[in-house]
Amino acid sequence: MNKQPINSAITQDEVLSLFQKSFEKQDEENRNLVELFHEQIGAELLALKMKINQAEISDQLKSYVEENLNGIVQKIKAYSNELFPMSLDQLGFEQAFNSRIRSYQLNNQVNIQVKKLFREKITLQPKIATAMFFIIDEIIKNCLAHAKCDTIEINLLSKTPFKMEIIDNGTGFECSMSNLRLEHSGLNKIICRAKAIDAKVKFEKLPLAGSKVNICVHE
């Protein structure tokens, strides 16, 4: 008896749904891990520093141990912030965004300029704030890794709806929101996170050099 072949075709919407669920689960796991770092491991390191300071050992050894413990704490903070910035939950999108931009400005040989064209504070719902933060973060990472640019300009255009554009002076790139490829993991993250909050993301290759990404999301 011949067996009928199984139809293994999967639609793009189904792929998007799978990606979205994966990112939501990953965000939750990362948030829990960062909380563990801050609440348990951080407290244990602080207690260890206090015991070292009270111990009957030489000042030179105390200084050496404290310096290394401080280094470990800074590494944990940096790793935690990369996984999931707790400032998103505690302080909101705008402060988390500004903090991440400062981090990029300090650690990369790229000039990142931010212009905010309205006075109101940016207030986004938690789900939208998380998605927007990681969309912007992924776009900047793509610019740094692939665009070969030396300047990134970020313009915050309006609060309601929240509109912004990211412009680089690199090699130029364009992509369709419907273009999902396994080898483009960074772009897949952008597309899927945007779909999850009904955000519009448009990639445009500029005529002379570089690319522009327009982002728009309604609360």
Image (cartoon, rainbow, N blue to C red):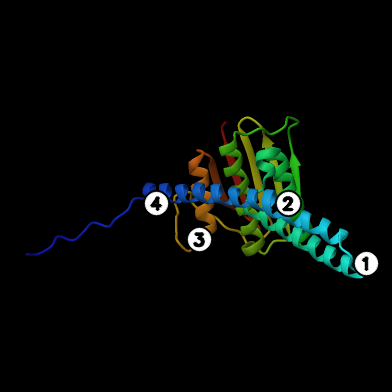
The local crowd at label 2, few if under 14, some if 14 to 19, many if 20 or more residues have their Cα within 10 Å, is few
Task: Check residue 89 in the rendering and tell me which mark sits there, or answer none.
Answer: none
**Amino acid identity at mark 2:** Ala
Residue positioned most to the right? 59
Going from N to C along the chain, the mark reached first, 3 or 1, is: 1
Work out how far the residue at label 3 is from the one at label 4, CA to CA, in angstroms. 14 Å
Q: At 41% across and 47% down in the image, what residue appears?
A: 17
The residue under label 1 is 59
Q: Position of residue 36 (x, y in %)?
A: 64, 51
Residue 124 is drawn in which quadrant?
A: top right
Gap between marks 4 and 2 measured at Cα: 41 Å
Measured in 3D between alpha carbons, the distance from the residue under mark 3 to the one under mark 1, in whole angstroms, is 53 Å
The CA distance from mark 2 to mark 3 is 39 Å
Which one is nearer the viewer's eye here, 59 or 76? 59
Q: What residue is shown with label 2?
A: 43
Identify residue for label 3.
184
Amino acid carrying label 4: it is: Val
Vertical position of residue 76 compared to residue 162: above or below:
below
Amino acid at circle 3? His
Q: CA distance from mark 1 to mark 2?
A: 23 Å
The tag earlier along the polypeptide, 1 or 4, is 4
Q: Please tell me which of labels 4 and 2 falls first in the chain.
A: 4
Left or right position of 1 against 106: left
Q: Quadrant of the C terminus?
A: top right
Q: Which type of secondary structure does the marked residue at label 1 adopt? A: helix
Regarding residue 154, the answer to whether it shows in the image is yes
Q: Can you identify the residue that label 4 sits on?
A: 15
Q: State the image coordinates of residue 139 (x, y, percent, origin top left).
A: 61, 53
